[in-house]
Amino acid sequence: MSARTLLLSAAAAVLLAPAARAQQDPLYSQYMFNTLAFNPAYAGSADVFTVMALSRHQWVGFKGAPATQTLSLHSPLPGQKLSLGGSLIHDVAGPARQTSAFVDLAYRIRTGADTRLSFGLMGGVNFFQADLATLTTVQTETANGNISGKALPNFGFGLFWHSPRYYLGVSAPKLLENTIGTDGVVATNKEFRHYFLMGGYVLDLTQDLKFKPSFMLRAVQGAPLSLDLNASFLLRDRVWFGGMYRFGNGVGVMAQYQFNEQLRAGYAFDLTTTRIGAYNAGTHEIMLSYDFKFSTGRTISPRYF
């Protein structure tokens, strides 16, 4: 089976099958530093105005492979209890393209001397389009086989409990199950609710070396659970390095460098362990984050999540 045939078959199954269920939201390896993309309660957790950009290129060398670009920003508001954030996400997978814009609002309360619990709400719109005519294995019933710029409004919620050293979060970023198509081609295809559970903890191994295990569990109706396990080390509060394992799907490595209290950059590389792995050269993910200092307070350094 060629790579093109494999891609077209997968895309057709996701877009056209009446009972199709799949992971529709973008996948990230550096999720612990990109939490706002799926949990609005993360907004303002660093107590500074943060801007983060991430670009993920999946299955390099595979024609029509998924690619995702994310831009997020968030900050606490005066008074420190309310936080505001926002995300722009552009996701491409074969003939399908999605561009979404969401606004996040979080309310934070203290639950201890150094812990906070945040309640988050998010709302926005996802613009979906698909050029189904490019799927040569599919017989479309429309004139051109396209879905052009369909607006899918949605909202979600999240909880995020954290201290400077550990965190636990749960979220459902899209609660509405919007119908994507009603033209007889994808009439039964819709957005399905995704649920996320994540957590992590930072341990001191030596004076210069820290260890952070973390996990991400994703769930969507009718599809297998997706679980990421990560093990990262922080050397002299500057250099992150470690590995990840995605059950039944892939393995990878990641690294991050903290240039100063405000600027950090990260990179992750994944290898697919499924049949698709034979047709691609892996997945690359690049992240850049900057904390703006508009007050006399200090930026949290280093940032563990």
Image (spheres, rainbow, N blue to C red):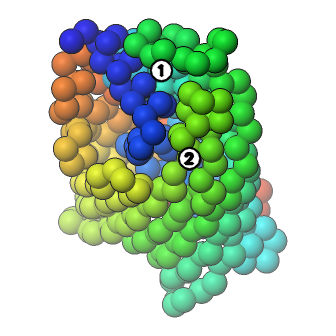
Amino acid type assigned to the residue bearing label 2 in the image:
Glu
* Camera sees residue 300: no
Q: Earlier in the sequence, mark 2 or mark 1?
A: 1
Residue 11 in the image: state x and y as whole percent: 42, 25
Camera-nearest residue between 110 and 192: 192
Residue 297: give x, y in percent of width and height: 68, 67
The foreground one among 118 and 217 is 217
Q: Residue at x 52, y 65 (%)?
A: 171
Question: Crowding near pointer 2: few (<14 within 10 Å), some, many (20+)?
Answer: some
Residue 269 — which label?
A: none
> For this rendering, which residue is in front, 135 or 53?
135
Residue 138 position by quadrant: top left
In the figure, 237 relative to 277: above or below?
Answer: below
Q: Give the SS element for disc 1.
A: loop
Whole-percent x, y for residue 85 in the image = 71, 56
Q: Is residue 178 left or right of residue 270?
A: right
Is residue 137 visible in the rendered structure shown here? yes
Q: Residue at x 24, y 24 (%)?
A: 276
Q: Secondary structure at mark 2?
A: loop
Which residue position is annotated with label 1? Answer: 94
Q: Residue at x 65, y 30 (%)?
A: 183
Residue at the bottom extreme of this rendering: 112
In this picture, is 142 found above or below 262?
above
Residue, far right: 78
For label 2, the residue is: 191
Q: Is residue 25 left or right of residue 61?
A: right
Circle nearer the viewer, 2 or 1:
2
Q: Position of residue 187 (x, y in %)?
A: 58, 37
User: What amino acid type is highlighted by mark number 1?
Assistant: Gly
Q: Could you tell me if the residues under marks 2 and 1 are in contact, i.e. CB atoms within 8 Å?
A: no
